[in-house]
Image (cartoon, helix red, strand yellow):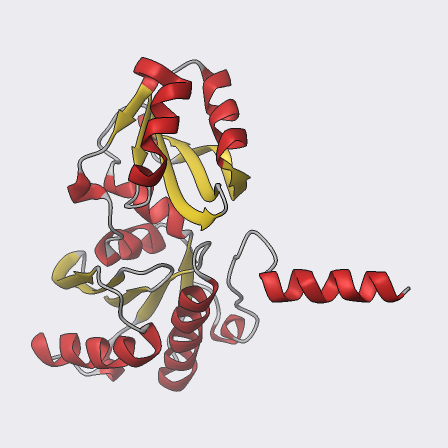
Amino acid sequence: MIWLGIDTANSPLAIAIVKDRRILTTEVTNIKVNHSAGVMPAIEHIFKKVDISPKEIDAIAISQGPGSYTGVRIGVTIAKTLSWTLQKPLVGVSSLQVLAANAGLYQGIVCSVIDARRQNVYAGAYDTSNGLVPIIEDGHYSMAGLLAKLKELGRPVLFVGHDVDSFWELIQQELGKNALRAPYTLDLPNAAQLIYLAEQQELPPLDATHTFVPKYCRLAEAEANWLREQKGKK
C-alpha cells in the first residue's frame, strides 16, 4: 500500500511517500515559504524522485490542524482535491499528535506546543507509556492555563515543537525540574510519522472526502470579529 503524507499546518512543510510500511522519501523544509506556491511543486518533485505516479498511491494522510489557519486550509484543500481527483481515501491526523509521535520512545508525558500568538498556544499532552494516550485534549490554551494543567499532573513533561523555545523560560519557571526539553531534531513535523499514525485508523469511504474539515480548535480572528459585530447589532 502506498501513502502520500502532507503536513502544512504551520511554517514547516513536510511531505512523504511510504510504500508497504517502508519510507521511500520524506522531506521537511522549515523556511518562510508560501505553502500555496510551494506544496504542489514539492509533491510533484517527490513523486518524480521515487518514480511513482500519483495514480499509484492508495491513500492520503493529511495533518488536519490545529495550527496556522492559512497553512491548515491550504494542506486540507490540496489533500481533498487529490483525494477526490485520484479517488483515494483521505485520513486526517492531529498536527499536535504528529509532533508528539516524534518523541514516542520517551516513556512519560509529551506536550506538543504550537504558538497561537498573544501568549496563547495550540497544545496537547499525551502519555506515551502505552501508545499516544491524550491526557490533555488538543486545544487552544493560554500558556499560563496550559502550564497550570500540566503542573497539576505533578510529573515530568517533555515539550516538543519548534515554538517551545519562545515559552521555555516561563515553562521552566512554572514546572521547575519537571520541565524537559526535547532535542531540536524532534521539533519539526515528520510526514512519515503522519502516515504511520494514519495507518492506525480505518480507511474512510471516498464520499467522506466531501465532508472532511480542518480542526482549528478556535475561531479565526475575522470570524470572531464578525460574530461580535453581529451580536452588537442585536
Q: As displayed, is residue 192 above or below residue 44?
A: above
Q: In this view, does 123 lie to the left or right of 32?
A: right
Q: Which residue is drawn at 43% across and 13% down?
A: 154
Near-viewer residue (211 or 21) = 211
Q: Is residue 44 left or right of residue 165?
A: left
**Residue 51 placement (x, y as % from top left):** 9, 80
Near-viewer residue (202 or 181) = 181
Near-viewer residue (118 or 185) = 118
Q: As displayed, is residue 74 above or below residue 194?
A: below
**Residue 69 placement (x, y as % from top left):** 48, 63
Q: Which residue is drawn at 47% across and 64% down?
A: 204
**Residue 174 placement (x, y as % from top left):** 42, 20
Q: Residue furthest right?
A: 234
Q: As displayed, is residue 108 above or below residue 219?
A: above
Q: Is residue 227 left or right of residue 93?
A: right
Q: As displayed, is residue 39 above or below residue 165?
A: below
Q: Is the C terminus in the top left, top right, bottom left or bottom right quadrant?
A: bottom right
Q: Is the N terminus in the top left, top right, bottom left or bottom right quadrant?
A: bottom left
Q: Which residue is drawn at 71% across and 67% down?
A: 226
**Residue 28 placement (x, y as % from top left):** 19, 60
Query: Splitting the image into 4 quarters, where does residue 34 fall?
Result: bottom left
Q: Which residue is drawn at 52% across and 68% down?
A: 212
